[in-house]
Image (cartoon, rainbow, N blue to C red):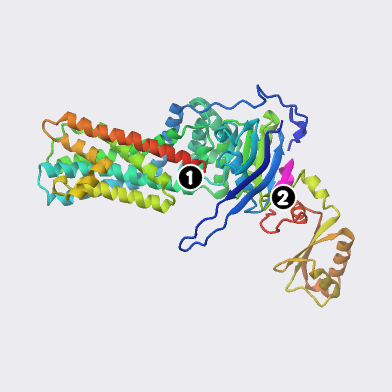
């Protein structure tokens, strides 16, 4: 049985009336028939740009939001009928830390542990263990709002870990974190998975992170799952193509016929051109731009095998909004 | 990373997991009301201590200032009693009504309720814990104001112990009202506005002696829960207080407290799961 089974989930936010200074917003179908399954012990990713409907989906998985239609089963429990059970099944890291901002790191983690049902002594012991594990020991006495964005995010992640749950739902857990903090997050996730078979549902718009940590990924665009597979499996669908990026010093030398021929296929962003081409054409293009007048105008170029971003674009997703860092 | 297949029982699609009974995994226990209330109370008290101490000073100075101002106008006797008790309860209104309405308004708007809503805590524990912490936070300011007032207006301090009932009961009524306003207001600015208005009402209707008010304002005064805390404290300045009347006033506070906290709990539940 899957840890998490979502079927035909639909959620529409109603239209809002316009107020002074705010335009009327039409109804938004944030989730438009989402179906997916998450297996035990998996790190399952939801990848998509802002506004794709990822957060709406996890807010329904965590019982915070009721769907218009469709079903959600988490660890065998029907969360559409019993949304309150979500709190007893999973640990959730949302995007906001408002509730914890004025508490110290130690108090925020300990209180969350208490509220997840730990006894006073247990909560203190787990608090110390989690804080040590994540390398937060130097910050325990500081209020969350005095911390940098990445540190605060890590402290919030600690609150999601305390009071062990078999499923963790993490909404962009590593936003703003430095590489050390990111490693601490993935090490903590990995340990829980190896020791207890903990399952993780992870929202991300970071392509590199998705490729390196996820077992499977559902690519979400405009409220629909447009593909769902392992990162490797998804990349195979576009394996015929490679990505060529050209950065021009000033403008592209369109008087060179080979460059002019490429212009139509290029996705332009400032001085940068991104092209997705079959391997032989890419080779020819590289040869053309690394000689003669085109080379004089060229500032930099890269040739790479496809990433999840290319998959995303090949599947018809909108290009903007995915992060590659 | 450990591959998913290496995890015990995680073979994809093999259905290797063994669940109890009807196939559903066991639920973690609900957090019991007592410990949850204690944890929320403690956390809220600590965050209020960090964030609100300057505001408590403002509240106390405001009340003492009002008493100093009115000392030139009001002579001792009945009006002096209303001024002192009204100013004391005003500290409670400032923190429990005004600041708590702001807090819940902002928490709701900023998505902070999600944190509590995804923990298995009884909603009442969250509301009561926050309300209790804010009400406790008013204790020093209220006591300082009451004692200062007694000195300024030469009122007897013999029965000031009544504050031990007045603060928690009017605190419950006003904090419940504050929490309900904060959670029900559609926008945080509106929650702040309502909290401020409530406090202004407690100021005007509580501090000014009731006998000189027009009838309509007198009704408004009767509707405001802080009034009954003010009356109870005011009666205790009598050499021989009418304890029955004091008890009745405090009973109204308690009833309003229960009702408004119930409304606030309902509002929290509604706000937490949209």
Is B96 located above or below residue B245 in the figure? below
Is B38 positioned to the left or the right of B218 in the image?
right
x 44%, y 48%: residue: B106
Residue A198, position as x, y percentages in the image: 67, 32
Tell me the quadrant of the picture where the N terminus of chain A can be found: top right
Range of the magenta residues?
A209-218
Element assignment for label 2 = helix
Q: Which residue is mark 1?
A: A101
Residue B134, position as x, y percentages in the image: 36, 39
x 28%, y 38%: residue: B140
Is B81 positioned to the left or the right of A53 in the image?
left
Q: Farthest residue in the front direction?
A: A69
Q: Which residue is mark 2?
A: A208
Check the residue under mark 2 and report the chain it is in.
Answer: A
Instruction: From the viewer's side, name the closer residue of B37 and A245.
Output: B37
Element assignment for label 1 = loop
Q: Farthest residue in the top direction?
A: B21
Confirm whether residue B25 shows in the render. Answer: yes
Instruction: From the viewer's side, name the closer residue of B262 and A17.
Output: A17
Q: Label 1 neighbourhood size at 10 Å, few (<14), some (14-19), many (20+)?
A: some
- The Cα–Cα distance between marks 1 and 2, rounded to whole angstroms, is 29 Å
């Amino acid at each position: 049985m899957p840890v998490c089974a979502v079927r035909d989930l639909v959620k529409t936010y109603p239209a809002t009336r316009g107020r002074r200074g705010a335009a009327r917003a039409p109804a938004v179908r944030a989730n438009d028939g989402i179906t997916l399954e998450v297996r035990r012990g998996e790190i399952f990713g939801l990848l998509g740009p802002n506004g794709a409907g990822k957060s709406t989906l996890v807010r329904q998985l965590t019982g915070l939001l009721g769907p218009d239609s469709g079903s959600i089963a988490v660890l065998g429990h029907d969360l559409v009928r019993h949304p309150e059970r979500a709190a007893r099944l999973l640990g959730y890291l949302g995007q906001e830390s408002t509730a914890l901002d004025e508490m110290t790191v130690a108090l925020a983690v300990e209180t969350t542990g208490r509220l997840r049902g730990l006894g006073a002594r247990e909560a203190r012991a787990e608090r110390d263990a989690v804080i040590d594990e994540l390398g937060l020991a130097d910050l325990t006495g500081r209020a969350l709002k005095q911390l940098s964005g990445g540190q605060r995010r890590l402290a919030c992640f600690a609150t999601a870990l305390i009071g062990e749950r078999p499923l963790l739902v993490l909404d962009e857990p590593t936003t703003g974190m430095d590489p050390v903090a990111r490693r601490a997050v993935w090490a903590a996730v990995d340990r829980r998975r190896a020791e207890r078979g903990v399952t993780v549902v992870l929202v991300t718009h970071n392509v590199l992170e998705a490729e390196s940590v996820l077992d499977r990924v559902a690519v979400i665009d405009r409220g629909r799952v447009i593909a769902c597979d392992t990162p490797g499996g998804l990349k195979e669908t576009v394996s015929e193509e490679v990505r060529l990026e050209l950065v021009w010093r000033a403008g592209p030398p369109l008087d060179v016929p080979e460059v002019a021929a490429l212009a139509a296929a290029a996705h332009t962003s400032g001085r940068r051109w991104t092209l997705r081409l079959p391997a032989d054409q890419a080779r020819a293009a590289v040869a053309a731009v690394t000689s003669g007048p085109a080379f004089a105008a060229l500032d930099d170029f890269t040739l790479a095998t496809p990433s999840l971003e290319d998959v995303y674009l090949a599947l018809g997703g909108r290009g903007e909004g995915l992060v590659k860092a | 990373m450990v591959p998913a297949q290496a995890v015990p029982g995680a073979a994809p699609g093999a259905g290797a997991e063994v669940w109890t009974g009807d196939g559903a995994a066991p639920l973690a226990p609900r957090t019991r009301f007592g410990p949850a209330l204690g944890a929320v109370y403690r956390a809220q008290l600590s965050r209020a201590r960090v964030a609100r101490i300057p505001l408590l000073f403002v509240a106390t100075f405001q009340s003492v200032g009002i008493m100093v101002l009115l000392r030139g106008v009001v002579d001792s006797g009945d009006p002096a009693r209303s001024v002192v008790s009204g100013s004391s309860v005003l500290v409670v209104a400032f923190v429990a009504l005004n600041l708590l309405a702001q807090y819940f308004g902002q928490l709701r708007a900023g998505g902070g309720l999600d944190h509590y809503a995804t923990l298995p805590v009884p909603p009442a524990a969250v509301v009561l814990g926050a309300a209790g912490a804010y009400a406790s936070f008013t204790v020093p300011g209220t006591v300082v104001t009451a004692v200062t007032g007694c000195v300024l207006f030469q009122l007897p301090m013999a029965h000031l112990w009544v504050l031990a009932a007045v603060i928690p009961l009017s605190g419950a009524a006003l904090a419940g009202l504050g929490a309900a306003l904060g959670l029900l207001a559609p926008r945080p600015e509106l929650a702040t506005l309502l909290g401020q208005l409530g406090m202004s009402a407690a100021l005007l209707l509580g501090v000014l002696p009731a006998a000189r008010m027009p009838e309509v304002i007198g009704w408004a005064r009767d509707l405001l829960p802080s009034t009954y805390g003010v009356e109870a404290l005011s009666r205790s300045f009598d050499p021989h207080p009418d304890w029955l009347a004091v008890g009745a006033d405090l009973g109204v506070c308690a009833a309003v407290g229960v009702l408004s906290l119930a409304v606030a709990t309902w509002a929290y539940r509604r706000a937490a799961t949209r």
